[in-house]
Image (cartoon, rainbow, N blue to C red):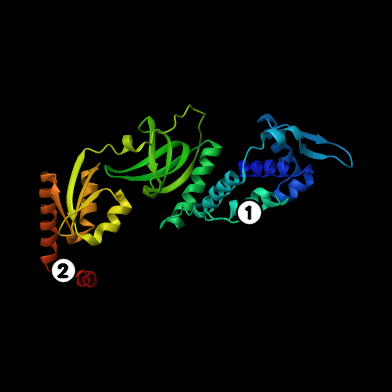
Amino acid sequence: MKIDRQLGILSILLQKESVTAPYLSEMFEVSRRTINRDIEDLCKAGIPIVTRQGANGGISIIDGYKIDKTMLTHDEMQDILAGLRSLDSVNGTNRYGQLMEKLSIGSSDFLVGNQSVLIDLSSWYKDSLAPKIEVIRKAIEQHRELEFFYYAPGGESQRVIEPCYLIFRWSSWYVWGWCKSREDFRLFKLNRMDKVHLSGHVFSDRTAPLPDLRDERIFTGGIKVKALFEVDCKWRLVEEFGPHCFQEQKDGTLLFQADYTNQDNLLTWLLSFRDKVELLEPKEIREQLRQSILQMKKKYETKIKDYTKDIEQK
């Protein structure tokens, strides 16, 4: 990727007194013309790069810039590298690992030492997620419209968007962009997207606001939940809501109290504990849960239909 290569070139120039265009061309496996364009872009960005001709010539950054502007500490650089390593976990490639190897040439003190922070952003859907991320990145960089089929709680639909940002939030990946059918900016979850592909249409730059992803805005609360859990559910409650979400009772049970945002999600979450939880409040949702359990009981009391026989008859 262009930005990755330019980041690599900048890091090498900060480490070395001078390098040549052929050296950079060979390292990044691109033409000298591409390297020259990258140098021009870095200059336009305000990086004071100078080029000297002759036997002792080369490409370098003026000394004052190195002293005054290289403000990253060892810990800050390690944080950046941890972030780069994490991106490989979802890309399904070793692109950023290769970038780090290139940055390490020159024995910079920033890039040595223990790599004590390991971040894996992949998921159970890594095989299908990585290609989607790659297509979305290309769409954003090339200003190409993105087409996909989307599954939402309200139904399925074909969508065309002008993608703006690829976002990792709430342990999932999302794309934020202008939805042409809704004529507004929307957030789409990658795991709900299918048949993702680039459109032939190129879109013009538009002022794209950053999405407001504050928890208090997205998860507005409103459902006051009170439930009684058995003690062996403690680890899940702590993991999902923290150690202060319940009070231990004299009989060893856990009185859980919290705000919940969505009724359907609440029912699903409670059912995942099977018979180890009793919902106390709200009363109306307790009744809905009771009705759901009765319907489940009815299904499981019915004799299983022999689908194999139906297939044989066909």
Residue toward you, 120 or 248? 248
In the image: residue 295, left or right of residue 178: left
Q: Earlier in the sequence, mark 1 or mark 2?
A: 1
Residue drawn at x 30%, y 53% as measured from the top left: 238
In the image: residue 166, left or right of residue 85: left
Examine the rendering and report whether any part of residue 62 can be seen: no
Residue 98's disc number: 1
Examine the rendering and report whether any part of residue 48 can be seen: yes
Distance from label 1 to label 2 (Cα)? 55 Å
Residue toward you, 79 or 314? 79
Residue 147 is situated, as x and y percent measured from the top left of the image, at: 43, 42
Residue drawn at x 35%, y 32% as measured from the top left: 182
Seen in the picture, residue 205 relative to 137 is either above or below; the reply is above
Q: Residue tagged by mark 2? A: 304
Residue 267's disc number: none
Residue drawn at x 27%, y 53% as measured from the top left: 237
Residue 214 is situated, as x and y percent measured from the top left of the image, at: 37, 36
Q: Residues within 10 Å of mark 1 (few under 14, many from 20)?
A: some
Indicate the secondary structure of the residue bearing disc 2.
Answer: loop
Q: Residues within 10 Å of mark 2 (few under 14, many from 20)?
A: few
Residue 248 is situated, as x and y percent measured from the top left of the image, at: 20, 54
In the image: residue 9, left or right of residue 127: right
Residue drawn at x 17%, y 51% as measured from the top left: 227
Indicate the secondary structure of the residue bearing disc 1.
Answer: helix
Residue 229 is situated, as x and y percent measured from the top left of the image, at: 19, 56
Residue toward you, 103 or 22? 103
Type of amino acid under label 2: Ile
Residue toward you, 198 or 230? 230
Task: Point out the image quarter for the N terminus.
Answer: top right
Task: Point out the image quarter for the C terminus.
Answer: bottom left
Type of amino acid under label 1: Gln
In the image: residue 213, left or right of residue 166: left
